[in-house]
């Protein structure tokens, strides 16, 4: 089972659909390995805010689920961020961050931004967060 299928089978559509849409608007898609890995990490952080302080745990868990190494997970998400920064919708990324970005966000910050996307969408549609 690939990353896309695993995410759709494991998580609620209310969690993964807003992320998928936002990442598409940022200019990336499922062809990047980091696409699904970033989604999975963001869902984990959204579900358990305490993980924000120790992203190492998030990377390890996502690595296990994707049968990948922890450093590969971080590297693939970082590649995704670089693609967005160089070729994607940087204005939307800055809107998500709520500030002008002088450089691409770190992997950890990017995952936090994506987790906030889920929370905002769920709140907008009246779901309990």
Image: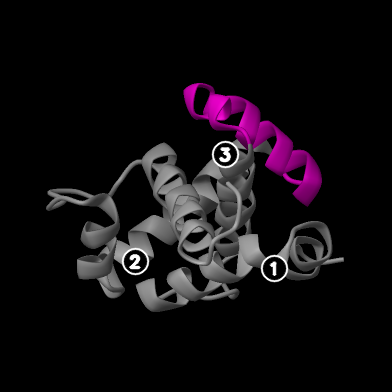
Disc 1 or 2, which lies upstream in sequence?
1
Q: Are marks 3 and 2 in contact (CB under 8 Å)?
A: no
Residue 63 x %, y %? 71, 41
Give the camera-side residue of 61 and 50: 50
The colour scheme applied to this rendered structure is one colour
Tag on residue 84? 2
Asked if residue 34 is among those painted magenta in the image, a careful observer would answer no
Residue 17 x %, y %? 60, 71
Q: Are marks 1 and 2 in contact (CB under 8 Å)?
A: no
Q: What residue range appears in magenta?
A: 48-68
- Count of numbered tags: 3
Instruction: Identify the element where label 3 is drawn.
Output: helix
Asked if residue 66 is among those painted magenta in the image, a careful observer would answer yes
Residue 89 x %, y %? 27, 73
| Image quadrant where residue 55 sits | top right
Q: Are marks 1 and 3 in contact (CB under 8 Å)?
A: no
Residue that label 1 marks: 13
Q: CA distance from mark 3 to mark 2?
A: 21 Å
Indicate which label's residue lies in the foreground, 1 or 3: 1
Tag on residue 51? none
Residue that label 3 marks: 45
């Amino acid at each position: 089972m690939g990353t896309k299928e695993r995410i759709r089978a494991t998580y609620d559509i209310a969690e993964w659909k807003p992320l998928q849409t936002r990442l598409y608007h940022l200019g990336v898609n499922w062809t990047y390995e980091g696409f699904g890995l970033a989604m999975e990490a963001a869902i984990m952080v959204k579900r358990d805010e305490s993980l924000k302080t120790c992203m190492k745990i998030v990377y390890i868990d996502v690595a296990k689920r994707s049968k990948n190494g922890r450093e590969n997970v971080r590297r693939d998400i970082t590649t995704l961020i670089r693609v967005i920064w160089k070729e994607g919708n940087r204005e939307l990324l800055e809107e998500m961050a709520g500030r002008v970005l002088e450089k691409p966000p770190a992997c950890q910050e990017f995952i936090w931004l994506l987790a906030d996307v889920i929370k905002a969408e769920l709140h907008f549609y009246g779901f309990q967060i």
